[in-house]
């Protein structure tokens, strides 16, 4: 066992141990406060649930405003790309990393709109990236192996990528972030996502494999068969396989890092807003490693990828918006961020019936 492997395993163990339960006293205080505000009880629907969850996460009522937010876009390539599951060349991953760093991607525009920072993390891009402002180098390897032929990565590589996500979360929180947003970039990563979702939920590949970047019918049928082959050759799903085993066999380095990012946020009691199907697949990994970590997650949106709905149902998460998005990058989560802020703002700024001199109902 290498020193790097030992260090990654130790960091993961410490992080899991630090994830505690939600603060139920703060949650109850938030429920009581919601009922005293100048509005009919329950009138804000899901936003009331979000505010209560934020109180439980932070252990404070009213919860602190989740400001500022930090987006981390985890980028990696996939060996399964060789199977022709995407019409886009693999080089696009590195090219999009450059676009993120130049501020030219959709996630950059959305983040600027809500005042969030964007950090790009190379955990497995199949190219050498020059050092740049806003880029963190946690490259584990130059892409995964082909999951349809055998394990996508070694156990040590999986742990290293998860540890990278933990480290990124800790760094952003240390720099002042009070809300984390998980994003991704990686050509062919919806194929790996579908395989992860099948392995964790038991769903059939035909039900959870989507068109990703917009493949045609023939490519979609082929993609489903590639996922099916990957599950078979890696003997998944299997009750004997741990979450890290499943991740190593059919996941991507960005899935691993996002899982660690979630664990890091949960350990620090900072809310994490999830994006679409890639972040959702990573959340399945995180939930398998530390089930309590899901208490610290909010589902930003529902993607049109069929696997995402299956994931949300399995995790018991309700998406805040449904705009038929399928872009990734963290875009849907960033769009949901103002709603999370609004939920917290209500707890700070709305008067109670007593304070406003408004009569409550009989």
Image (cartoon, grey):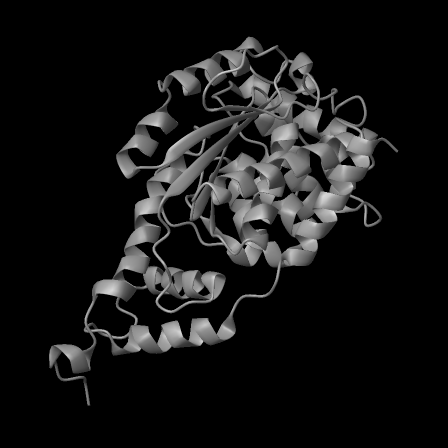
Q: Image point 58% across, 18% down: which residue? A: 219
Q: Nearer the viewer, residue 120 or 132?
A: 132
Q: Residue furthest front?
A: 175
Q: Is residue 158 above or below residue 267?
A: above
Name the residue nearer the viewer: 253 or 132.
Answer: 132
Q: Residue at x 51, y 45 (%)?
A: 309
On-image quarter of the N terminus: top right
Q: Residue at x 54, y 59 (%)?
A: 295
Towards the viewer: 99 or 17: 17
Quadrant of residue 159 within the rendered picture: top right
Identity of the residue furthest to the right in this view: 1
Residue 3 placement (x, y as % from top left): 82, 33
Q: Position of residue 68 (x, y in %)?
A: 36, 44
The quarter of the picture where the C terminus appears is bottom left
Q: Is residue 173 at least partly visible in the picture?
A: yes
Please determine whether, in this image, residue 47 is positioned above or below residue 32.
above
Q: Is residue 58 above or below residue 140?
A: below
Residue 134 in the image, given as x and y percentages of width and height: 46, 24
Residue 205: in sight, yes or no? no
For the point 36% across and 26% down, the residue is 108
* Residue 148 vertical position relative to residue 324 in the rendered view, above or below: above
In this view, which residue lies farthest toward the left?
357
- Residue 288 appears left or right of 306: right
Give the quarter of the image for residue 332: top left
How many badges with numbers are in the image? 0
The residue closer to the viewer here, 354 or 207, is 354
Left or right? Give the position of 353 relative to 31.
Answer: left
* Residue 361 placement (x, y as % from top left): 19, 85
């Amino acid at each position: 066992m290498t020193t790097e492997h030992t260090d990654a395993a130790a960091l993961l163990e410490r992080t899991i141990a630090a994830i505690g339960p939600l603060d139920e006293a703060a949650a109850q205080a938030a429920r009581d406060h919601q009922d005293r505000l100048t509005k009919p009880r329950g009138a804000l629907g899901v936003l009331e649930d979000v505010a209560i969850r934020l109180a439980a996460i932070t252990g404070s009522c009213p919860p602190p405003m989740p400001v500022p937010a930090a987006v981390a876009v985890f980028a990696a390539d996939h060996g399964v790309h060789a199977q022709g599951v995407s019409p886009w060349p693999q080089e696009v991953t590195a090219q999009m990393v450059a676009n993120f760093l130049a501020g030219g991607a959709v996630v950059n525009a959305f983040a600027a709109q809500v005042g969030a920072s964007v950090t790009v993390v190379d955990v497995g891009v199949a190219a050498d990236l020059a050092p740049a402002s806003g880029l963190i180098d946690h490259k584990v390897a130059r892409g995964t192996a082909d999951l349809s032929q055998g394990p996508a990565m070694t156990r040590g590589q999986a742990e290293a990528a998860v540890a990278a996500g933990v480290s990124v979360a800790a760094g952003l929180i240390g720099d002042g972030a009070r809300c984390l947003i998980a994003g991704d970039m990686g050509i062919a990563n919806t194929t790996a996502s579908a395989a992860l979702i099948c392995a964790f939920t038991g769903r059939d590949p035909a039900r959870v494999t989507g068109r990703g970047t917009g493949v045609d019918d023939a490519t979609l049928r082929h993609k489903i068969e590639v996922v099916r082959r990957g599950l078979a050759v890696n003997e998944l799903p299997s009750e004997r396989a741990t979450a890290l085993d499943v991740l190593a066999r059919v996941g991507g380095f960005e899935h691993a890092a996002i899982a660690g990012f979630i664990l890091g946020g949960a350990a620090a009691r900072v809310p994490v807003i999830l994006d679409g199907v890639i972040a959702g697949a990573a959340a399945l990994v995180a939930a398998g490693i530390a089930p309590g970590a899901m208490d610290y997650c909010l589902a930003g949106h529902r993607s049109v990828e069929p696997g995402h709905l299956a994931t949300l149902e399995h995790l018991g998460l309700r998406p805040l918006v449904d705009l038929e998005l399928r872009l990734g990058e963290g875009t849907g989560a960033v769009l949901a961020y103002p709603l999370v802020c609004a939920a917290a703002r209500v707890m700070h700024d709305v008067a109670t019936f007593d304070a406003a001199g408004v009569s409550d109902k009989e």
